[in-house]
Image (cartoon, rainbow, N blue to C red):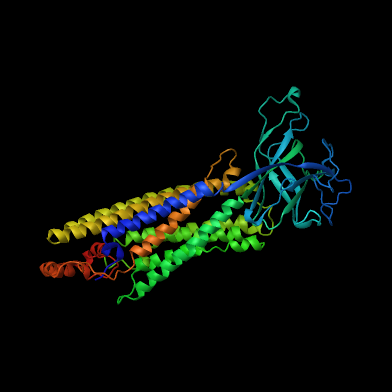
């Protein structure tokens, strides 16, 4: 039996391959740390208060500009909120937005002054009439992109004593989710925000004295986007070529592929799917669904990678009568599929709706906030529990191999060293797998927290570009290494030995064949761990 490359490749060549992969891993971290800028940029804006005496409410082309030749009539303080439009132009003067920014997330914060006769009531709800417009030239008219009536619950705290002496001091209010656009296809954006007051309907009553509105616009850095696209463009053909080469070697064998070989191929397909640089089209087209599509691809890869690790360990634990059947892993893979489906539903509930209404946010309501917070916490706990379970499975695999190794028949020193080397290589690969799993779990938790940190109120996680590019490079190198090392080898162990050595080991080879190699599989370790049921 020829076996896999991981067994038949010489130690020298295997070390060279390992060093090359390690250098590529270091390079992927260096690309993010030395070349790419930080992943995102946050820009702060203070809304300009414009006077609207005719109450146009975004009808026609009457949009309120905070500056420029067509700027609105500004006011510093106001008493009647129905005549006020808070205008924000994105970006700042003399700058342009770019399609390389990929997305735009806007967070809102109110500056509310304390008044004894106009305090913020418990559970106060702010109603906003908001409009978003765009244009690609400073001379063209504004085109409406979205218009909606939104509600946001205030969460403010007044640290001083509520007395007349402290009137005019400001509440400390939490940041509120405001808007998310999945594509930055235009150069200029304009936000007009109204706070309509209706005492009869209790609209915007008991929300305090709002003085100003501050916005924080967050977008992906164009430099980071270019580095990210370049990595995807380079890695896609690399993984695709090794995947085709791997499956071609599998199909050339006389036996049908086993489950382990099939799931390695499936992992290669999912890696290629997430690698495909379709984001290049988002630079030229206004594809607002790219964020959602990216999340779906990421979720499919997560589900495939986590399922692979379960099967990879399980196939080295089960006897031959149980292995090579995907159905026996339903208890372990089922929760992974269910969790991935929950991720998809959660994403559709927010980014799916935002395709029609960019002002929608699941964090805007109490129920939505509690569900989102619970989801992030539960997802983090489940990821940690998965890693602990994987560590337990790897420990069982090591113990299983140790037990099977002691039951091997007596053999010559050279033959025994050969099998000891195979076991060492496999154990090293399992430890690399654990390290990859640990980094993946950490990346998943940080990504979830980082996506929701604006809604947590003060808890921020800074993620460096090197972490993104390094983890992404690690996934590709890991999948590449698996398909290369587990591809069938054309070289047989002992081909390089002398004929005298082969004659001396002939009797031993016959004994090993009767105890191990009658079990079909990609490697000797795979056969060794599954031989018990056949004995």
Query: Could you say which is closer to the camera, residue 245 or residue 304?
Result: 245
On the picture, is 1 further left or further right than 141? left
The residue positioned 45% from the left and 55% from the top of the image is: 473
Indicate whether 42 appears above or below 516.
above
Q: Is residue 379 visible?
A: no
- Quadrant of the snapshot with the C terminus: bottom left
Query: Could you say which is closer to the camera, residue 6 or residue 340?
Result: 6
- Quadrant of the snapshot with the N terminus: bottom left
Query: Could you say which is closer to the camera, residue 340 or residue 227?
Result: 227
Q: Is residue 46 visible?
A: yes
Total number of numbered discs in the rendering: 0
Residue that extends furthest to the top in the rendered view of this protein: 165
Query: Could you say which is closer to the camera, residue 519 or residue 89?
Result: 89
Indicate whether 246 appears above or below 408.
below
The residue positioned 74% from the left and 30% from the top of the image is: 114
Q: In which quarter of the image is residue 476?
A: bottom left
On the picture, is 411 further left or further right than 376? left
Where does the image place residue 487, in percent across and percent down from the top left?
34, 67
On the picture, is 465 further left or further right than 415? right
Where does the image place residue 343, in percent across and percent down from the top left?
53, 56
On the picture, is 100 further left or further right than 317? right
The residue positioned 16% from the left and 59% from the top of the image is: 416
Q: In which quarter of the image is residue 146?
A: bottom right
Residue that extends furthest to the right in the rendered view of this protein: 54
Where does the image place residue 380, in percent across and percent down from the top left?
47, 48
Where does the image place residue 263, in percent across and percent down from the top left?
39, 66
Indicate whether 13 appears above or below 377.
below
């Amino acid at each position: 039996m020829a076996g896999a490359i991981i067994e038949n490749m010489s130690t020298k060549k295997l070390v060279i391959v390992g060093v090359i992969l390690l250098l590529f891993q270091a390079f992927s971290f260096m690309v993010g740390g030395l070349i790419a800028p930080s992943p995102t940029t946050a820009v702060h804006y203070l809304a300009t208060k414009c006077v609207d005496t005719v109450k146009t409410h975004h009808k026609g082309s009457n949009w309120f500009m905070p500056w420029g030749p067509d700027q609105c009539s500004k006011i510093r303080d106001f008493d009647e909120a129905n005549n006020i439009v808070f205008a924000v132009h994105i970006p700042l003067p003399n700058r342009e937005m770019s399609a390389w920014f990929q997305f735009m997330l806007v967070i809102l914060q109110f500056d509310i002054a304390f008044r004894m006769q106009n305090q913020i009531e418990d559970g106060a709800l702010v109603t906003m009439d908001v409009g978003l417009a765009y244009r690609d030239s400073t001379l063209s008219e504004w085109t409406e992109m979205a218009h909606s009536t939104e509600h946001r619950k205030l969460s403010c705290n007044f640290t001083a004593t509520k007395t007349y002496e402290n009137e005019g001091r400001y509440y400390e209010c939490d940041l509120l989710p405001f808007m998310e656009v999945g594509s930055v296809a235009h150069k200029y954006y304009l936000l007009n925000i109204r706070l309509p007051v209706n005492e009869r309907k209790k609209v915007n009553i008991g929300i305090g004295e709002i003085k100003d509105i501050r916005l924080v616009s967050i977008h992906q850095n164009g430099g980071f986007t270019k580095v990210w696209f370049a990595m995807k463009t380079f890695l896609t053909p690399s993984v695709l070529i090794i995947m085709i080469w791997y499956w071609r070697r599998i199909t050339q064998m006389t036996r049908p592929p086993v489950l382990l070989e099939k799931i390695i191929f499936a992992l290669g397909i999912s890696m290629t799917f997430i690698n495909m640089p379709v984001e290049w089209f988002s630079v030229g087209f206004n594809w607002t669904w790219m964020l959602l599509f990216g999340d779906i691809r990421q979720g499919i890869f997560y589900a495939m990678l986590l399922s692979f690790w379960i099967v990879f360990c399980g196939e080295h634990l089960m006897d031959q009568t149980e292995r090579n059947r995907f159905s026996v892993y339903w208890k372990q893979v089922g929760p992974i599929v269910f969790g991935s489906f929950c991720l998809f539903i959660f994403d559709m509930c927010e980014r799916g709706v935002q395709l029609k209404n960019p002002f929608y946010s699941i964090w805007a309501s109490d129920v939505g906030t509690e569900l989102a917070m619970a989801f992030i916490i539960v997802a983090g706990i489940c990821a940690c529990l998965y890693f602990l379970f994987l560590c337990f499975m790897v420990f069982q695999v090591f113990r299983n191999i140790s037990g099977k190794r002691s039951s091997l028949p007596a053999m010559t020193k050279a033959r025994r060293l050969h099998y000891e080397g195979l076991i060492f290589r496999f154990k090293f690969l399992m430890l690399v797998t654990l390290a990859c799993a640990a980094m993946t779990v950490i990346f998943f938790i940080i990504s979830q927290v980082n996506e929701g940190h604006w809604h947590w109120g003060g808890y921020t996680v800074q993620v460096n570009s090197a972490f993104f590019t390094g983890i992404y490079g690690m996934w590709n190198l890991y999948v590449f290494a698996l398909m290369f090392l587990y591809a069938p080898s054309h070289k047989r162990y002992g081909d390089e030995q002398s004929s005298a050595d082969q004659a001396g080991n002939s009797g031993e080879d016959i004994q090993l064949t009767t105890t191990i190699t009658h079990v079909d599989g990609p490697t000797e370790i795979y056969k060794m761990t599954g031989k018990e049921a056949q004995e």
